[in-house]
Image: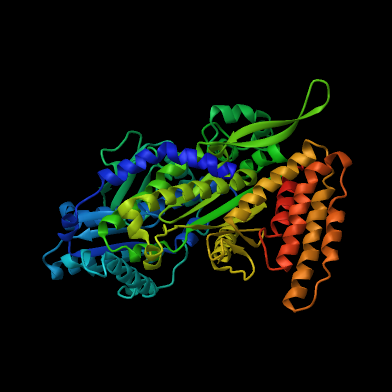
Amino acid sequence: MDKAQTQSAKLFAQHQQHLEGLLKNEAKPLEHYQQYNYFVKCDISGIQDFIFYVQSKGAAKTLKARSFYVQALCDVVQFILEEKLGKTNVELLYNGGGNFYLFIKSDDEVTLNKQLATIRTELDDKLHKESHYIILSKVKTIPSDFTSEEGFGKKWETLNKLCNAQKLQKFNTYAKGFEPYKNPDANNEQLKELWRKFSGQLTKHKSFTIEKKPNENNGVGKKRLYLFNTELCLKEELSSNPAWNFEHKIVNKLPYWHNNLFNEFTDFINAYNEPFKNLPDKEREAEEIKKDNIVEFSSLAHFAKIRTGTAKLGVLKMDIDDLGSLFAQIKNIKYTHQLSLAMYWFFEEFLVHLLEQSFPYYQLVKQPDGTNKYTKKTAYFKDNIYTVFAGGDDCFFVGAWDAILQFTQQLQANFNAFQKYLGSQDDLGEALKTEEEKRKQKQHQITLSAGVLILDAHFPVIRFAKAAEEALEQAKHHTRKNLKEEGKLILKNSISIFGQVLSWNEFNRVINLSNELQTLIQKHGESRAILNRIKHSAKGYDNLQQRIARGESIYTPKVWRLQYYLRNVKKANLKNVEPIINEYTCALVNTFAKQQTTNPIVFPIAARIAEFLTRK
């Protein structure tokens, strides 16, 4: 087992008992659900455009507020439904990631439809000038829906199809929705400042409350959100409603300038603040780095530069593969509920523990005698990674590029341990299986795909959000005829980086190989020229691949000449280099023979990362 996977298995094992308790204590009998006769989904469309429509300068101070606002929309709509219909008539199944599912109990369908229509009009009235939109869909249920052969999954599928259709009918009963309007955020400096202040307050509070309060428009205040004639207010104490508490949840956890971090980077902070010292107080306070402030993206890139010599950001977008289809095949509502709880726990709670972990890095440290020593150090993910959102079935992170790569590796390995645990549970594991998996007595595997970018610190936010989405889509839809893993074509369950799609095993090899190359250069004194030779060799590999695609013959000795080209290193380092070069050349030959065990593109990607790691 890979070292990262071993560490992740240990971390998940430390918190597994909490998940076990959650699944056991929250279990409800089938009869409990059969008293409800409507299944409802609330879904917010246009989330990405709303969250990332911000100026790149100072983005860290606004993105989280806008991300929280999206989830707050769901919390408030749930609150409104409970207020209008009666709390005892509403049962929440899941709320997270910009949508929720719940059940409604009503003996009067006409009255219920009128109530929902009134709520729909109220939502449209507040949203018709916004880029985002709320869909509220429902289907009727009867007791046999929870016990029939088709099962509850059929209702899940029907509801989601209805919701998707209604996304195409935005404002179909609301004429004002088609009137022209100007985006209120476009040039509103006062509003931008309120978003920044709300983000700062979000990290310092422990909970929120929601109360009815008339307001003309949806909006944001220093500690408040005004939504649909309610007010969401941040609180310094814990709430009696556990769903409104931030404790042990990722929702308000951001990197901030705590004492240790502030003291570690005093020289950087002083230099950063110097240009602003003569500005008026209000302008200076908005620009300066201060204790307890959120760490800006440019500072995260600087942290990476201190460790590696490369000042870049990493962006990670990750998504569970085919989660909707998985829910649709579960026949028993009990296991639908358990899977929903488990996903909420992993993305909303467990990721907090992962962010609290340290990660290693290596530097050449000058000794008193003037020599350099290759030294292992550690930093913390929570100081280097900014969570834009995490919940439902996806997550989005921005951070120091070197931290993002290791965090990606750790997150996937932990998720793998998590999904294996779910599959090992007798009843739940059986409910997750397809009919074919049941026949073969094989455990169902829930997988992740991801897109990773490495960018300059000032790359526009709206552009890197779109690029991350494109990278994720590339990972989910890329197929390769000759690249096999355990005898199957790689479909999804992949990661895109530098425009190349890798399996997770290949990505782990990339990270490990880049570390080996860094050690070779910084510890053993090898020239960085070896990295260029590996990267340039990829061009020759592409040419050979094109010849294969055209059905032309390959002169195999050309591949072996590559081995001698790459072995041009210091004699003392040959024993460290040869295993890497042999693996690379064998991978090339095996590819041409269609007996591939290692994807050759792993090596140029690892060399590029090693180049970033060794600039200091």
Relative horizontal placement of residue 445, taking residue 428 as reference (left or right): right
Where does residue 133 sit, x and y in percent of width and height?
38, 65
- Between 368 and 23, which is closer to the camera in this rendering? 23
Judge whether residue 222 can be spotted in this image.
Answer: no
Q: Residue at x 39, y 75 (%)?
A: 168
Quadrant of the rendered structure where residue 131 is? Answer: bottom left
Q: How many marks?
A: 0
- Between 590 and 341, which is closer to the camera in this rendering? 590
Q: Residue furthest left?
A: 107
Q: Quadrant of the N terminus?
A: top right
Judge whether residue 147 can be spotted in this image.
Answer: yes
Q: Residue furthest top?
A: 368
Q: Compared with residue 134, is residue 23 higher up or lower down, i.e. above or below? A: above
Where does residue 88 sit, x and y in percent of width and height?
16, 52
Q: Compared with residue 107, is residue 73 higher up or lower down, i.e. above or below? A: above
Quadrant of the rendered structure where residue 70 is? Answer: bottom left
Q: Compared with residue 229, is residue 377 higher up or lower down, i.e. above or below? A: above
Q: Residue furthest bottom?
A: 551
Q: Give the colour scheme shown.
A: rainbow
Where does residue 543 sit, x and y in percent of width and height?
79, 70
Q: Quadrant of the C terminus?
A: top right
Where does residue 93 sit, x and y in percent of width and height?
28, 55
- Between 28 and 611, which is closer to the camera in this rendering? 28
Quadrant of the rendered structure where residue 157 is? Answer: bottom left
